[in-house]
Image (cartoon, rainbow, N blue to C red):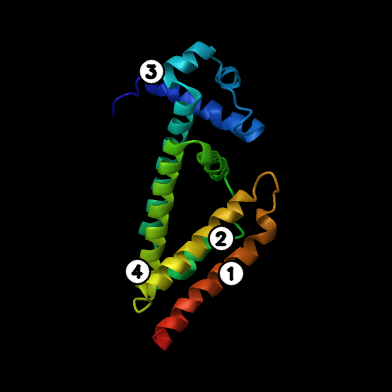
């Protein structure tokens, strides 16, 4: 396998420093100067390799989305064809699952996306893909559920999942509500079974 280019290595170092800065100072407090100091390089080199701050935000979002997409792909592939719902809920809401730094940064970027159309488009695509995947998983388990119900339940589960992670900072409440989120998602999904049986 070829060795990464010097530019790729430098961008990775900058992105890692940017993530550490966001976790410590928030996105607003993560200036190029601070990122450069954290990366151990001059500000001019950060600009040379990563461009403007907005471009750096886009690079960070792309990197994290790519990483989380790969983790999600592996998770989906491990799901059984039948009886996947329990595995899905355990994966999304298990008390053993800790909110990691990537999820915290994604939550931070989501808040920023209101001021950044390119970032908003990127995150919208990511959410839509996640919603579509949830809908397909639910459809396998509840093939008679209506498309509207599948969409609504997928949205509800997605909202519970993302909202739980958004509580990670600065509130640090995700552990307090993780069990409730699990049960809420479980009850929401159970409506698909009821609607399928009743033919609603």
Residue where numbered disc 4 is placed: 81
Residue where numbered disc 3 is placed: 6
Is there a contact, CB below 8 Å, between mark 1 and mark 3? Answer: no
Q: Residue at x 52, y 41 (%)?
A: 114
Tag count in the figure? 4
Which sits in the foreground, 173 or 6?
Answer: 173
CA separation, marks 3 and 4? 43 Å
Q: Which mark is residue 184?
A: 1
Is there a contact, CB below 8 Å, between mark 2 and mark 4? Answer: no
Which sits in the foreground, 88 or 129?
Answer: 129
Quick one: label 3, few (<14), some, or many (20+) residues within 10 Å? few
Direction from residue 22 to residue 135 in the image, left or right: left
Direction from residue 14 to residue 163 in the image, left or right: right
Q: In terms of secondary structure, where does tag 1 sit?
A: helix
Direction from residue 113 to residue 198 in the image, left or right: left
Is there a contact, CB below 8 Å, between mark 2 and mark 1? Answer: yes
Asked where in the image residue 37 lies, by quadrant, the reply is top right
CA separation, marks 2 and 4? 24 Å
Q: Quadrant of the N terminus?
A: top left
The vertical placement of 144 against 22, above or below, is below
CA separation, marks 1 and 4? 23 Å
The vertical placement of 120 against 57, above or below, is below
Q: Nearer the viewer, mark 2 or mark 4?
A: 2
CA separation, marks 1 and 3? 48 Å
Q: In terms of secondary structure, where does tag 2 sit?
A: helix
Task: Give the mark, 2 or 4, whose residue is nearer the N terminus.
Answer: 4
The vertical placement of 179 against 39, above or below, is below
Quick one: label 1, few (<14), some, or many (20+) residues within 10 Å? some
Which sits in the foreground, 13 or 65?
Answer: 65
Residue where numbered disc 2 is placed: 160
Q: In terms of secondary structure, where does tag 4 sit?
A: loop
């Amino acid at each position: 396998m070829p060795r990464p280019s010097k530019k790729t290595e430098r961008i990775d170092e900058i992105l890692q420093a940017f993530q550490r800065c966001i976790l410590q100072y928030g996105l607003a407090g993560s200036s190029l100067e601070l990122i450069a100091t954290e990366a151990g390089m001059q500000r001019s080199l950060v600009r040379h390799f990563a461009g403007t701050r907005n471009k750096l935000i886009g690079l960070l979002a792309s990197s994290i989305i790519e990483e989380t997409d790969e983790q999600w792909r592996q998770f989906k592939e491990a799901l059984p064809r039948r009886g996947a719902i329990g595995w899905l809920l355990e994966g999304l809401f298990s008390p053993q699952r800790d909110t990691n730094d990537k999820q915290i940064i994604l939550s931070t970027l989501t808040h920023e996306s209101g001021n950044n159309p390119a970032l908003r488009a990127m995150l919208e695509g990511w959410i839509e893909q996640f919603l579509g995947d949830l809908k397909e998983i639910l459809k396998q388990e509840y093939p008679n559920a209506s498309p509207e119900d599948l969409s609504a339940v997928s949205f509800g589960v997605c909202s519970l999942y993302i909202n739980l992670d958004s509580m990670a900072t600065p509130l640090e409440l995700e552990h307090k509500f993780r069990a409730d989120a699990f049960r809420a998602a479980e009850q929401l999904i159970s409506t698909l079974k009821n609607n399928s049986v009743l033919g609603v």
